[in-house]
């Protein structure tokens, strides 16, 4: 995993203040705002052709904006129906192919639901599927990182331990750490010491390079007994983002930090300004 010297801040999708709701206009706006990255949202499906992806990649390279992508929501690598499993693998592959053309280095996805299966059985199934996907990607000379995300609901596969174990076991897989989800899932993971403990666990499982090139999601979050309900702006949430940023700085974390708050660039800029002032 390539070492990156600094943590870049950006938005999950096109900034709300962008002149047009196109990916290229979004990249231009990210640069105008002084942010450093953007996650391209393919959550409703990969609807970008090869030519368009090449043009977007050119703009991102020219503006010095790093890109990643979020794969469609309709993925379950533990689906019980073979056709749903095959479609889930194909959606990840489609996202990885377009992201490679964009010049992006990572794709994020929610890996699976437990359904009625034991977590250990789900892990084995997800691992097998990811190995198949990576094998196909390598045959196509695609080096984009697959990043299963830590999830915010008890029904979803994706605890910190599960995501780190997959990343340690499958070549080409690395974690996407959604700190808001970790907080929503347990009501914990919301203090400097807890954030530091998470970063220590990542380093212990995957080595220093995993901290040097992280993919992070952060937002305010509303949650209940079953976990995540919806994303909030930081001002309306109990999420201690300043303590997270302090831990990230102390651990010299690098990579991309993507803000998923409803006000997108407003909270992304708040995060960047808070981090820079530490």
Image (spheres, rainbow, N blue to C red):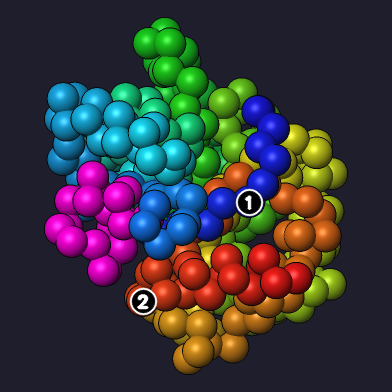
Question: Left or right: 224 with respect to 26?
Answer: right
- In which quarter of the view is residue 2 placed? top right
The quadrant in which the N terminus is found is top right
The spot of residue 243 in percent (x, y) is 73, 75
Local packing at callout 2 (Cα closer than 10 Å; few below 14, some 14-19, many 20+) is some
> Is residue 114 magenta-colored?
no
> Helix, strand, or loop for circle 1?
strand
Tell me, yes or no, if residue 114 can be seen here: no
Question: Circle 1 sits on which residue?
Answer: 7
Image vertical order of residue 253 relative to residue 130, above or below? below
Q: Residue 263 shows which numbered tag? A: 2
- Say which residue appears at 15% left-offset and 58% top-offset: 20
Q: Are marks 2 and 1 in contact (CB under 8 Å)?
A: no
- Say which residue appears at 30% left-offset and 50% top-offset: 28
- Say which residue appears at 84% left-offset and 72% top-offset: 193
Q: Nearer the viewer, residue 132 or 19?
A: 19
Image vertical order of residue 28 relative to residue 100, above or below? below
The spot of residue 213 in percent (x, y) is 65, 40
Image vertical order of residue 124 relative to residue 172, above or below? below
Q: Nearer the viewer, residue 153 or 147?
A: 147
The quadrant in which the C terminus is found is bottom right
Region in magenta: 13-30
């Amino acid at each position: 995993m390539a070492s990156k010297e600094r943590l870049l801040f950006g938005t999950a999708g096109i900034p709300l203040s962008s002149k047009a709701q196109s990916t290229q206009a979004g990249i231009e706006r990210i640069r105008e705002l002084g942010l450093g990255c953007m996650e391209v949202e393919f959550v409703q499906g990969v609807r970008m052709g090869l030519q368009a992806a090449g043009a977007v990649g050119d703009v991102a390279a020219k503006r010095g904006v790093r890109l990643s992508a979020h794969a469609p929501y309709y993925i379950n690598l533990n689906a019980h129906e073979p056709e749903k499993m095959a479609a889930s693998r194909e959606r990840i592959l489609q996202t990885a192919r377009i992201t490679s053309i964009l010049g992006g280095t990572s794709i994020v996805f929610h890996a699976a639901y437990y359904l009625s299966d034991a977590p250990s059985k789900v892990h084995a199934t997800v691992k097998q599927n990811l190995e198949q996907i990576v094998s196909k990607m390598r045959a196509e000379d695609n080096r984009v990182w697959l990043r299963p995300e830590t999830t915010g609901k008890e029904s979803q596969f994706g605890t910190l331990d599960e995501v780190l174990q997959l990343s340690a076991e499958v070549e080409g897989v690395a974690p996407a750490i959604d700190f808001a989800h970790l907080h929503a899932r347990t009501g914990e993971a919301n203090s400097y010491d807890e954030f530091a403990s998470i970063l220590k666990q990542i380093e212990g499982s995957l080595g220093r390079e995993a901290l040097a090139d992280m993919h992070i999601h952060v937002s305010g979050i509303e949650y209940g007994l079953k976990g995540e309900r919806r994303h909030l702006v930081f001002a309306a949430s109990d999420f201690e983002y300043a303590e997270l940023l302090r831990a990230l700085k102390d651990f010299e974390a690098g990579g991309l930090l993507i803000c998923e708050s409803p006000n997108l660039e407003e909270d992304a800029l708040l995060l960047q300004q808070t981090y820079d002032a530490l």
